[in-house]
Every structure is written in structure tokens, then in C-alpha cells.
Amino acid sequence: MALFQLILAFQFASPGEVLFELGPVTIRWYGFLIASAVLIGVTLSQFLAKRRNVDPELIGDFAIWAVLAAIPCARLYYVLFQWDVYSQHPDRIIAIWQGGIAIHGAVIGGIVAGLIFSRLNKLPFWQLADLIAPSLILGQAIGRWGNFFNSEAFGTPTDLPWKLYIPPSQRPPQYIDFEYFHPTFLYESIWNLLVFGLLVWLFVRGQQGKLNLKLGTLFLTYFAAYSFGRFWIEGLRTDSLMFGPLRIAQIVSLTGIVFGTLGLVWLYRLKRPLFPM
């Protein structure tokens, strides 16, 4: 009984958004996690590149392109769909350290950068995309914890044992009297780790010759699998970006599911290569 009561008493509660302060310098969890995700992702993709006989230095070069494209696009995407708020506080548009970036915007920016980079370096886009996909989903799993420290991107009220405490200042007006919410950041982080495991398993099996892994498979699998989880989790959130009555992330996720699934059918059912890009 005591153990059961302890489980019921368990809750997530953010210790705050600041990691540490050193004089006038403030290091926030959100920025630290994004930087960590980039460094870990580059290292992983370079490791995978060696196994595919691709120059790992190209991955390091592309990382600069990806960061310069993805982070501004992620912020722009978020601001555009929250323009009614940011139009009243234009000074907050660049305050990315306070949170407020959209992974779909980052992916769009990264894809555009990848298309240009692969063309300039004569590297097949689908090859580059396959090498980046595991790092991308791992980075998303890490980055989601920034939402935890900022007490944002949570779900509807719940009394489940893994409930997330949200301070009154962060609660939506309609839920001001509720204390505990679904930790949707945790749901998505766990889902992303599962997708990461799937991609690594596919890569290893392909390298071992136990799977006939065709070019583009990892990236398409990433798109379909991540989008499937995001579609479900987004339905629990209270702060979704909206387009009229529709949740933008769910619309984009449906598109990702269709794109990834049709791409895999094209590769393995119809046995045709992906179009060069």
C-alpha cells in the first residue's frame, strides 16, 4: 500500500528554465539541450557516414548549414502561427531561449539546406538524408526535455501517476484550477527514442547484409514513424499551433505519414528507386 501511495504521489515538476548563471551570463536548459543534441547528432551521423563510405567531413560541413537553416525556420514557423501574440510583443520574436520553436519548421529548413548542400557537393540527397535521420530523431528526443524545463508543451489535466505539475503562471486560462497535466514532452521523447532504435536497427541490419536497405529508407521511415506518434500526442496538447479549428502539427503529421508510407511502397512494393533530388 505504501508503495502504491508513493507511485500516486509521484509527479514531474520543472526545477526552472535556468541551468546556471555565471555573472551576467545565463545558461538556460533549452539552449543547452539544443546545443547538446546538435553535437551528439553530428558525431553519430559522422560515425554512420564512415560505414556508408561517405566522407564524415561532409556531415560536419552540412551541420553548419542545417543549424543556420533549421533554427531560424523553426522559430519563424512558430512565430507565424502565433502572430496574434508576437505582433503585440515584437521584441520577443527573437527570444528563442524562452522556447517557442517548431520541429516541423526546423525539418523544412533542414530539407531545403540538404537539397542545396547535396547538389553543391555532388552527394545524393537520399544518402545524406539517411545519414541524418537517426541523429534528427535522437535530437528531437533530447530537445523535448527543453519543454519540461520551460513548463510548456504539456497536455490536458490528468491524475495519472506520471502527472506533470505546471505552475499557475503557465497554465491556460481554462485550466487555471488544475495543477497536473499530461507530460506530452515525455510521451514524445519516449516515442522518438523508439523510432531512433528502429532506425539504428535498420541501419545495422542493412550493413550486415541481412536487409536489402534501399536508398531513402531510413529517412522515409523516420517521416512515417515520427509523424504517426506526433499525430496522436498532438491531440493531447493544450497549446497546439492552430489554423482555424485545425491543429497544424496534425495536418503536417498526416502529410508525413502519407509521404513516408507511399515512399516505402514505391521502394519495396513497386521496386522503383526514389527520384533523384
Image: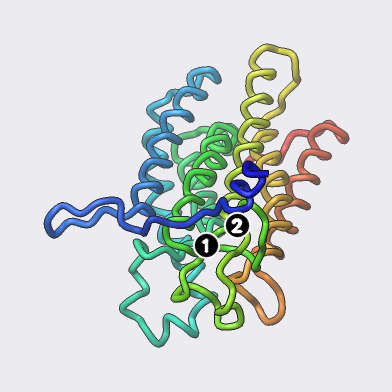
Q: Position of residue 150 (x, y in %)?
A: 42, 61
143 lies above or below 239: above
Callout 1 amino acid: Tyr
Residue tagged by mark 2?
Answer: 163
30 lies above or below 222: below
Secondary element type, mark 2:
loop
Q: Residue at x 72, y 38 (%)?
A: 274
| Circles 1, 2 touching at the beta carbon (< 8 Å) | yes
Quarter of the figure with the N terminus = top right
Q: Position of residue 19 (x, y in %)?
A: 30, 51
Callout 2 amino acid: Lys
Quadrant of residue 209 in the image?
top right
272 lies above or below 67: above
Q: Residue at x 52, y 24 (%)?
A: 48
How many residues crowd mark 1 within 10 Å: few (<14), some (14–19), many (20+)?
A: many
Q: Is residue 10 visible?
A: yes
Quarter of the figure with the C terminus = top right
Q: Is residue 191 visible?
A: no
As rendered, which of 59 and 142 lies closer to the eye? 142
Q: Residue furthest right?
A: 269
Q: Position of residue 271 (x, y in %)?
A: 83, 31
- Identify the disc placed on residue 165: 1
Q: Residue furthest bottom?
A: 88
178 lies above or below 184: below
As rendered, which of 182 and 41 lies closer to the eye? 182
Question: Left or right of 21: which side holds 35?
Answer: right
Q: Position of residue 156 (x, y in %)?
A: 65, 68
